[in-house]
Amino acid sequence: ILSGPAGGIVGYSYATYFHKLNKNKKPVIGFDMGGTSTDVSKFDGDFEHIFETKIAGFQITAPQLDINTVAAGGGSRLFFKNGLFKVGPESAGADPGPVCYRKNGHLAITDANLLLGRLIPKYFPKIFGKTQD
């Protein structure tokens, strides 16, 4: 059903769980944050299947990999209301994007991750800001 994230599970299972350095075969967690959603899964040696799920309000009965989706991603906007941050559902979009893109964008989860030290600016591509530097 979620073919992209399902392919991600197969990829990270072979890149991590089956890697020669993972001698004790420790389980691994997949975390795929997109613009407005995040997919989370785990692999412990077997592909976990579920047979029913609800997507966008529709019940689907079909075998599929167990992937949990959260309706918040890097581009989900942050709002400060009543002393708390609220996430989305609005998106900062790709252009102008989050504030850290330096294109007069909106505060988003990507900005929070940058301020918390979870993103390393020197690894950002040199395409941000008015002069794209």
Image (cartoon, helix red, strand yellow):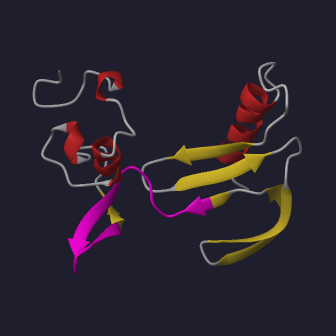
With 13 as the anchor, is 73 left or right in this view?
left
The overriding secondary structure of the stretch rendered in magenta is: strand
Residue 116's place in the image compared with 51, above or below, is: above
Q: Residue at x 89, y 45 (%)?
A: 46
* Magenta highlight range: 69-87
Residue lying at 26% horizontally and 46% vertically, measured from the top left: 97
Q: Nearer the viewer, residue 18 or 6?
A: 18
Q: 12 or 5: which is nearer to us?
A: 12
Exactly how many numbered labels are in the figure? 0
Measured from the top left, where is residue 26 in percent x and y?
79, 38
Q: Is residue 124 visible?
A: yes
Name the spot of residue 106 as percent of width and height, x first.
20, 54
Mark yes or no: residue 62 visible.
Answer: no
**Vertical placement of residue 99 versus 132, above or below:** below
In the image, is residue 12 part of the stretch drawn in magenta? no
Q: Residue furthest bottom?
A: 82
Which quadrant does the C terminus fall into? top left
Residue shown at the point (20%, 46%) measured from the top left: 99
Considering depth in this image, is 1 or 126 the residue closer to the camera?
126
**Figure quadrant of the N terminus:** bottom right
Where residue 72 sits, quadrant-wise, is bottom left
Q: Residue at x 11, y 24 (%)?
A: 131
